[in-house]
Each structure stands twice: as C-alpha cells, then as structure tokens.
Amino acid sequence: MTAYDSNNPFAKILRGEFPSYKVYENEHVLAFLDIMPRSPGHTLIIPKAPARNILDISPDDFAHVARGAHRIARAAMTAFKADGITLQQFNEPAGGQVVFHLHMHVMPRHNGVALLPPASRKEDGKVLEENAARLAAALKGSE
C-alpha cells in the first residue's frame, strides 16, 4: 500500500491552504461540504490524524470519523428535510477512492431523487455557503 501523502487536497484543507465550506470541527475531525455534491448538503468528514484510508487509520481515530458522520447525518436530515441518508467510504483506487485522505461521505436523500454522478459538476459558491449555513444551524440546534 502507498504511504500517506501530506500534500493531498484534504491535508491542505486541514492546514488552511485550500478553502472549504466548513460545517463542523472538533479536535479530531473536520466536516465540510463537497464542492461537487451528489445531493444538496453532501458533506465530507475527515480525521485530523493523517490516514490514507481505513486500512491505515487507528480504530480510535476511525471511531471519531464515524461519530462525526453520525452527527452530520442527524443534522442533515433536519437541515435538508431529507427522507434518508447515504453514507459512503472508499478505500484504494480499486475501491473507488480518489482523494487519499480517509473521508466519509454523508449525502441527504429524498424519495425518488437520484444522486448525481460523482464529480459531475462543481456547485455554485453561493449555494454551498447557503447549504453550509443551514447545516451549521441544524448542528447548533442538536447540541
């Protein structure tokens, strides 16, 4: 397996070198909107610990990511009046991983509405700002 690359895009987001639409952060994880969402509110949860994927993350650090995904999923149900949630997590190229910093996708879903294809379009910044604000407000309401 290839070693962790500290210059991957998500590591750069963690260091503040790349911008993001942050919705949640604690000492262990960062959650931000996907700029090419498959559904409105599509959020990525990443560990602050350097981990290429599930194959090299510690169980404790992965548990923090899972707890973050749980928190985001519950808030997304409210913020986006969703009927359900899709969670995805990919590992290595054969498993569909594209960015090599562990991340979990949380996608709010609505009955009868298909997910957009992966990386099919970049969302408008204003829409991402609005969705980040909605999700952040729902997170505050769940504390």
Image (cartoon, rainbow, N blue to C red):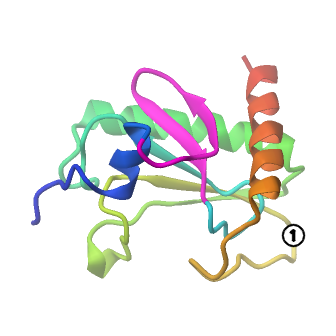
Q: Is residue 10 magenta?
A: no
Q: Give the quarter of the figure containing the C terminus.
A: top right
Eyeballing the image, is 121 above or below 124? below
Span of residues in magenta? 17-34
Q: Position of residue 99 (x, y in %)?
A: 36, 64
Q: How far across and down, in percent of the image, does residue 132 sit?
A: 74, 43
Q: In the rendered view, does 129 fall on the left or right side of 62?
A: right
Give the SS element for disc 1.
loop
In magenta stretch: residue 30? yes
Residue under the point 30% across and 57% down = 8
Extreme residue toward the front, this view? 17
Task: Answer above or below: position of 4 versus 140.
Answer: below
Amino acid under disc 1: Asn
84 with respect to 6 (left or right): right
Residue 2 image position (x, y, % from top left)? 11, 65
For label 1, the crowd category at 10 Å Cα-Cα, with few meaning under 14, some 14 to 19 and many 20 or more, is: few
Task: Determine the image quadrant of residue 55.
Answer: bottom left
Residue found 83% across the figure and 40% down from its top: 134
Residue 26 percent location from the top left of the image: 49, 23
Q: Residue 125: which quarter of the image?
A: bottom right
Q: Is residue 55 left or right of residue 80?
A: left
* Image quadrant in which the N terminus is located: bottom left
Residue carrying label 1: 111
Residue at position x 44%, y 60% from top?
89
Q: Residue furthest top?
A: 143
Q: How many marks?
A: 1
Q: Residue at x 42, y 52 (%)?
A: 103
